[in-house]
Image (spheres, helix red, strand yellow):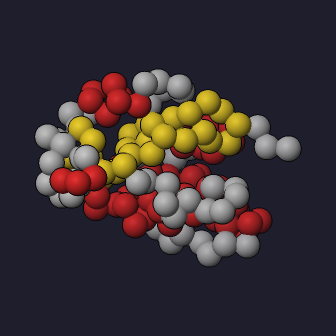
Amino acid sequence: MMNWTGRYCLVVSNGVLKNSSDVFSILDPDVGGTNTFTVPLSADGTGDPTHWAAYTPLQVETRDALLNMTTTEFKTYVDQLAQERGREPAGSITAFKNDLQMSAEDANPWDFIASLGLQRIVPDTI
């Protein structure tokens, strides 16, 4: 049985979206997280996305890995999960790990996004 946390708001820059999706395709224990980061963000809520957000529960082990592991330790963790889950390794995870912004557990996601100087892009403005 997996132990889950509350929800976390996760934000990554547009430049590491692919890498972040590759990592979450391994971290997500069910179907893979290739569509984890689906909320487009920018400084004024218009134009092309500069960042992407997700609001998701995490396995306790994954939460701890994201918060406490060095990049090297996190890479080992992700590679081990890939092998256990029969998924392709993510390659380099450095960009993702160094770029990720993560809220406190069950924090208001919109307040967290605003604290980063970002706003949601309403879909009809993309």
Residue 75 visible at all = no
Looking at the picture, how far across and down is residue 10, in whole percent? Answer: 44, 42
Q: In this rendering, is residue 59 above or below 31?
A: above
Instruction: Judge left or right: residue 123 versus residue 5.
Output: left
- Tally of numbered tags: 0
Quarter of the image that includes the N terminus: top right
Asked if one can make out residue 36 in the rendered structure from this viewpoint, the answer is yes
Q: Residue at x 28, y 58 (%)?
A: 14
Note whether 97 is above or below 90 in the view shown: above
Image position, residue 96 (x, y; %): 42, 55
Q: Quadrant of the C terminus?
A: bottom left
Q: Residue at left 34%, top 60%? A: 16
Q: Nearer the viewer, residue 61 or 120?
A: 120
For the residue pair 58 and 80, the one nearer the viewer reads as: 58
Looking at this view, name the residue that lies furthest to the bottom: 88
Residue 52 is situated, as x and y percent measured from the top left of the image, at 34, 51
Q: Is residue 12 left or right of residue 79?
A: left
Q: Is residue 84 above or below residue 65?
A: below
Residue in the picture at 52% in, 46% down? 70
Examine the image and state in which quarter residue 76 appears: bottom right
Give the residue at x 61% y 62%. 32
Nearer the observer, 100 or 38:
38
Extreme-front residue of the structure? 124
